[in-house]
Image (tube, helix red, strand yellow):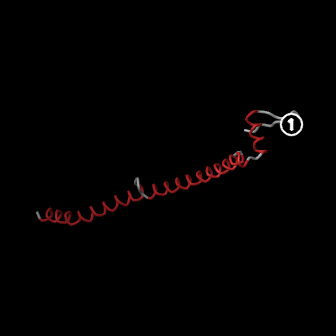
Amino acid sequence: MTVSHEIKKRAKAGLGPIIGILAVAYFSYHLIEGDRGLFAYLKLQHDIERAEDIYQITEREKQALEKRVDLLRPENLDVDMLEERSRDVLGLAHPDEIVIYRK
């Protein structure tokens, strides 16, 4: 009876630290691997950087298009731009010109 009593006593004494260690291990794992963990944070940062790069490219394209549109406005009409657009839209060329289409 003393041996079983000693085993129960030691099991009760060791139960708290074991539960504590398991809790720390559980939360540590989810701190790194969880949905809001370290790896998810790093992936999100990478996605943000990629989206910012795409935004910068799109913004440059938008500015280039805005410059071309500004050249076609009536108050600031550029004759060369008007001729270029009309030839492109209508498919016209002078008889002595060679037309090369780029895609």
Tell me the quarter of the picture where residue 36 sits: bottom left
Q: Quadrant of the C terminus?
A: top right
Residue 63, image x, y percentages? 65, 51
Residue at point 56%, 53% (across, down): 50
Closer to the camera in the image, 89 or 42? 89
In-front residue for pair 73/33 = 73
Outermost residue to the front: 75
Residue 96: give x, y in percent of width and height.
89, 35
Outermost residue toward the right in this view: 96
Mark 1 secondary-structure assignment: loop
Residue at x 86% of width, y 36% of height: 97
Q: Is residue 12 above or below residue 61?
A: below
Which image quarter holds the N terminus? bottom left
Of residues 5 and 78, the one drawn nearer to the viewer in this rendering: 78
Residue 7 in picture, x, y percent from top left: 18, 63
Farthest residue toward the left?
Answer: 1
Which residue is under mark 1? Answer: 97
Q: Amino acid at mark 1?
A: Glu
x 40%, y 53%: residue: 35
Q: Position of residue 52 (x, y in %)?
A: 56, 54
